[in-house]
Amino acid sequence: MKNNKVSERGGILNQVKKLKASGLYPYFNAVSSTQGATAVFGDKEVLMFGSNNYLGLSGDPRIQEAAKKAIDKYGTSCTGSRFLNGTIDLHLELENELKEFLNKEGVIIFPTGFQVNSGVIPAVADKNDFIFIDELDHASIIDGCRMSFARRVKFRHSDMADLDQKLANNGVSGDITKLIVTDGIFSMDGDIAQLDKITKLAKQHDAMVMVDCAHSIGVIGKNGSGTASHFNITDEVDLIGGTFSKSLASVGGFIAGSADMIEYLSHASRSYIFSASLPPSSTASALAALRIIRNDNSLQLKLWENTNYAIQLMNEAGLDIGNAESPIIPIYIRNSFTTFKIAKLLLDNGVYVNPVVAPGVKETDALLRFSLTALHTKEQIEYAIENIAKLVNKYC
Ligand code: PMP
């Protein structure tokens, strides 16, 4: 029998070779500047509509200054896990301020958002338990499920009737854990999870709820405090996770929950205990960004002004943007090759967007991921959308 990984490797290498030969290969292009409304690829400055820098804080001088000060005081690394020698007072300050921001009893921070999902999920659900995930949940949630001995049950994207049925059909309440995990804003399609309905179903079926607010921190909720705040149901959500690598201009991640749950996770989550802690500069950057957004929602308002304007222009141009309702706007091309081609031609015209193709999404859902920041101007948005519409009309 053929080894699956050997044939998968062959398939991937083949596709990469073909794409490189066609001149459309879009990955690993080096950026040589900060990323704001524009970014420099090699020596070419382009409009940046493909980052996760929603509030435009990456590259903000106040945050850069905080990072430099932290390096001067603590050095460049904590040289160990939080559990042992790797905790510095900045970690505790960040956890305390996040706890207040998210309105939860406890928070711990992880070296990455990926490690939040891969470390928290297996610590919460074990053999005999059930994890219910939306079919469009992020890869790190899927890997978290793979690292747990619990059974994984996928429900159709944002389909509450399907979730209801799957919760009813799997496991008996009482002696087992049922954990529902969802993205707060879906990372590629940009729609907001129906967290209010999910928490209602959770109550009916005695399940726990975990939401990954990677793309909703800074974007929705009071001062950008995420999806649970957006629906005003913070108390009904057991675990709120997220990352510092998007709106918070840094790297790292967090999980928030009840005091007991967080105390437990800090002693049981393997990616938290057995990995070196968040470096001082990254911790200070996230803390500086958090302080900015807690005190001032003007960036969040500007982000939404830009988002609403872009959605309006795209609708007027007749682009297929599905149920776009956030700064992540999917422009469906529905064919991988055409998606690569348009992304490349856009880059030649000075506009960077992300091509998202199979197997990341279904072939018929291949899309250009267009994302806004608070820094874009109306003129930049108009220029980008005009170019996209021209190419889409020509090639689709
Ligand atoms: N969750 C979601 C929904 C994400 O989109 C991402 C990153 N793209 C992550 C988790 C992982 O976050 P990090 O980059 O901090 O590892």
Image (spheres, rainbow, N blue to C red):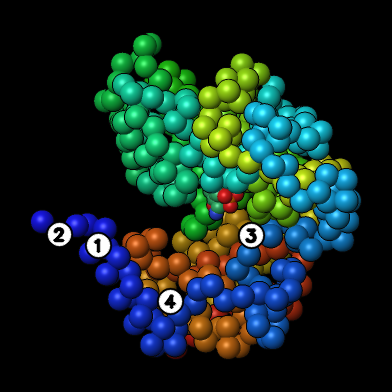
The kind of residue on which mark 4 rests is Thr
Q: Secondary structure at mark 1?
A: helix
Numbered mark located on residue 339 in the image: 4
The kind of residue on which mark 2 rests is Lys
Q: Residue 106 at x, y = what percent?
A: 68, 24
The residue where tag 3 is placed is 52
Question: Which is nearer the eye, 156 or 7?
Answer: 7
Q: Residue 231 at x, y = what percent?
A: 62, 35
Q: Is residue 271 left or right of residue 46?
A: left
Earlier in the chain: of badge 4 and badge 3, it is 3
Q: Secondary structure at mark 2?
A: loop
Q: Are marks 1 and 2 in contact (CB under 8 Å)?
A: yes
In the depicted structure, whether residue 129 falls above or below residue 307: above
Q: Residue 336 at x, y = what percent?
A: 37, 74
Earlier in the chain: of badge 2 and badge 3, it is 2
Question: Which is nearer the eye, 309 or 366?
Answer: 366
Earlier in the chain: of badge 3 and badge 1, it is 1
Depth check, mark 4 against mark 3: the one in front is: 3
Give neighbour class at mark 4: few <14, some 14-19, many 20+ (Cα, 10 Å): many
The kind of residue on which mark 3 rests is Asn
The residue where tag 1 is placed is 6
